[in-house]
Amino acid sequence: MAWDERLFDLLDDLEGQAEALYAADRDAELADRSRAEYAAVTLAARLMASVGDEVTLDVAGAGRVAGELQRVGPGWCLVAGGVRQWLVPTDAVEAVRGLSGRAIPEVAWSPVARLGLGSVLRRLADEGAPCMVVTRSGTRHDVVLVRVGSDFVEARTVGDEPRSVLLPLGTVGAVQSDGT
């Protein structure tokens, strides 16, 4: 073997090593980018990708809520099971089963889907229909929603002696209403 062949073999070997190092660095960088991108995915984005699917939520105070995931907004989701609907603040969700592996970022949502929990509660108040509010501690209130403030909902109890009750939004685990 001539010296020029040995030189070309050496250069080929060095080139192969450089390509292998580049591929290893690229793979590590792609993995880092993938982890960084996934860190920005929200629960609401994962829920939005599963609208129309059957899901099961474990909700603080309310327990297990199962049914079709019908709507999602920033900070809330709506699950329909039978003739009842459950409005659930996402920060009351302890676990979710049945979600798609995909996510839909909030920038891709329709303007209606960007309405917050307060807007949905105001709609329920406008309807004036009885509902059950379950707090995260498990207390159940059979009420009609009256008004919604920035961080609370005002309701009137259902029964012989209706009374006003104020519920801070941070204590609401779920709101059950008739599916309308």
Image (tube, grey):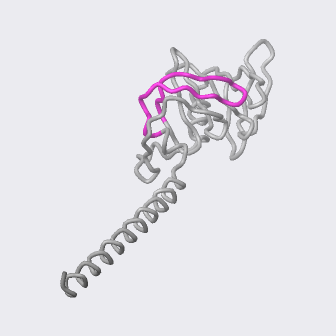
Q: Residue at x 49, y 42 (%)?
A: 46
Rendered location of residue 115, percent (x, y) = 52, 44
Q: Residue furthest front?
A: 1
User: 56 and 132: which one is in front?
Assistant: 56
112 in the magenta segment: no
Does residue 71 sit above or below 19 in this rendering? above
Q: Residue furthest bottom?
A: 3
Q: Is residue 172 left or right of residue 24?
A: right
Rendered location of residue 129, percent (x, y) = 60, 22
Rendered location of residue 158, percent (x, y) = 73, 17
Q: Residue at x 53, y 55 (%)?
A: 40
Q: Is residue 150 left or right of residue 73?
A: right
Q: Is residue 170 left or right of residue 36?
A: right
Rendered location of residue 72, percent (x, y) = 50, 38
Number of callouts in the render? 0
Q: Residue furthest top?
A: 160
User: 31 and 60: which one is in front?
Assistant: 31
Main SS category, magenta section: strand
Does residue 159 sit above or below 50 in this rendering? above
Boundaries of the magenta span: 48-71
62 in the magenta segment: yes
Q: Residue at x 78, y 24 (%)?
A: 139
User: 13 and 130: which one is in front?
Assistant: 13
Q: Quadrant of residue 154?
A: top right
Q: Quadrant of residue 56?
A: top right
- In the rendered image, the quadrant that contains the N terminus is bottom left
User: 53 and 122: which one is in front?
Assistant: 53
Q: Residue at x 51, y 15 (%)?
A: 82
